[in-house]
Image (cartoon, grey):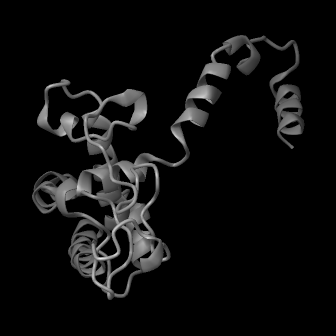
Amino acid sequence: MRQLYIACTCSVADYGVPIWWAGQKGLLDKYQKLQNQALRKILGTFRSSPIRAMEVEASLPPPAIRLDKLCRSYILRTIDFNNQHAIKKRLPRTFFLNQGNFDIDTSRFLDWSTPAPQNNALIIDREHRADPDYRSTSSNTRKHPSQLIRLLSMVAFRPWPHLVHSLCAALDLDDLIDITISDLSKAGQAITHKNQIH
């Protein structure tokens, strides 16, 4: 029953998620109700059973996590697209390894490496914008210029140059990995390992 839900229901319901998913509460509630109903059928539980416990028991992530994962997977796939691909051309020039052709007007929009504000916390003062008439007075929150750029911000967990520098510094595996066979017993080695961790 679980495989049927994943193969048939989730694949149809999740179609096109990278295009439209932006954390909409109303849509998330509908997805959660669908999953709750499926969990009860899969596990044969009562209606009053706790949802999180059923999700753990059935090994199904909550819908918000599933939809975010689909969006992140899509963005990571765009890196492997051919350079002539239409989506690859819409990646920003500042994206990792200068893969795109799109220039973002940072005076109006958020850059891909800036996460979207969760609670409209990034408000721009009209006097300090390059074009004060660009948006109406009721909506002066900066957003990403497109859904693709907003999705890129989901994988921008920290600035890329720092990540590249740390990866290059970590390439010496001898410093990272200690491959030795201990002469201690299994129990003695376990105690040594616990002491190293704490």
Q: Quadrant of the N terminus?
A: bottom left
Q: Position of residue 132 (x, y in %)?
A: 35, 75
- Which residue is at 30% across, 79% downward? 25
Q: Quadrant of residue 178?
A: top right
Quadrant in which the C terminus is drawn: top right
> Residue drawn 31% across and 66% down?
63
Q: Residue at x 42, y 69 (%)?
A: 129
* 101 to the left or right of 180: left
Nearer-the-camera pick, 190 or 98: 98
Residue 71 in the figure: left or right of residue 171: left
Q: How far across and how far down the image is residue 154, in percent?
A: 40, 53
In this rendering, the answer to whether 136 lies above or below 20 is below
Q: Is residue 193 visible?
A: yes
Quadrant in the picture for residue 75: top left
Count of marks, rendered view: 0
In front of the other: 171 or 112: 112
Which residue is pictured at 54% across the width and 43% down the height? 159
48 w.r.t. 182: above or below: below
Residue 178 visible to an observer of this rendering: no
Rendered position, 150 above or below 41? above
Q: Nearer the viewer, residue 176 or 49?
A: 176
* Image location (x, y in percent) of residue 89: 19, 35
Could you tell whether 148 is left or right of 117 in the image? left
